[in-house]
Image (spheres, helix red, strand yellow):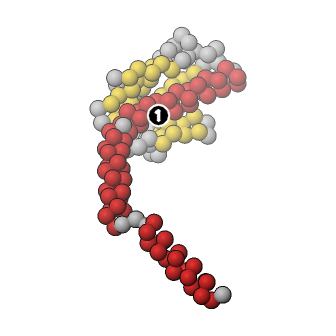
Amino acid sequence: MQILVIAVLKNNKKNFFLNSYTLIEIIAVIMILTLILGMAMTALRSSPVFLTVNALANEIRQLCSDAKQSATTKGENVTIYFDPENNSISFQDVSINIADSIKLYIDDRDLSQFQEKEKLFLFYPDGTGAEKKLTIEYNGERAILFLSPLTGRICLYEN
């Protein structure tokens, strides 16, 4: 019985070494994966500029939509503010933090220069709003949010 077990173990060792990869094959696979990862990182590095501006613009649009809904439901004016102390845009208990590298302009005035809370958008109970233009800039990419005074809708223009 012992001879049979030893013979089986010796036979498994031979199969293990015959079925394993050589050092050169492993290095080649690692190099190929590194090249693919490098190409992916290069492609993804250029996209956050556009995605950051668009993502922020869409978050602000959603916040404005919620504010308009609140104004019509409650029957009172609702305001969205920019808080320079926290570098955030807020409505009630919801706020959107803005990265320091992103520039915001309200009607062509730089919001980073303000010391106190600034009204960004004002929505009325009848569904309309006060006309405002918010510009978002990041590394040359720009998105403009325009509040239509007639419909109270936020329109997004990309440059």
Asked where in the image residue 108 lies, by quadrant, the reply is top left
User: Which residue is nearer to you in this view: 23 or 99?
Assistant: 23
Left or right: 109, with 84 as reference point: left
Number of numbered labels in the structure image: 1
Question: In the image, residue 73 lies at what x, y percent?
Answer: 70, 23
- Residue at image point 52% right, 27% down: 61
User: Which residue is nearer to you in this view: 37 or 45?
Assistant: 37
Asked where in the image residue 71 lies, by quadrant, the reply is top right
- Residue at image point 50% right, 29% down: 58
User: From what the image shows, is residue 106 above or below residue 3?
Assistant: above
Amino acid type at mark 1:
Ala
- Residue at image point 41% right, 37% down: 52
User: From what the image shows, is residue 134 above or below residue 19?
Assistant: above
Classify mark 1: helix, strand or loop.
Answer: helix
Asked where in the image residue 39 lies, by quadrant, the reply is top left
User: Which residue is nearer to you in this view: 106 or 49?
Assistant: 49
Q: Which residue is mark 1?
A: 55
User: From what the image shows, is residue 119 above or below residue 37?
Assistant: above
User: From what the image shows, is residue 111 above or below residue 146?
Assistant: below
Question: In the image, residue 10 lies at what x, y percent?
Answer: 51, 80
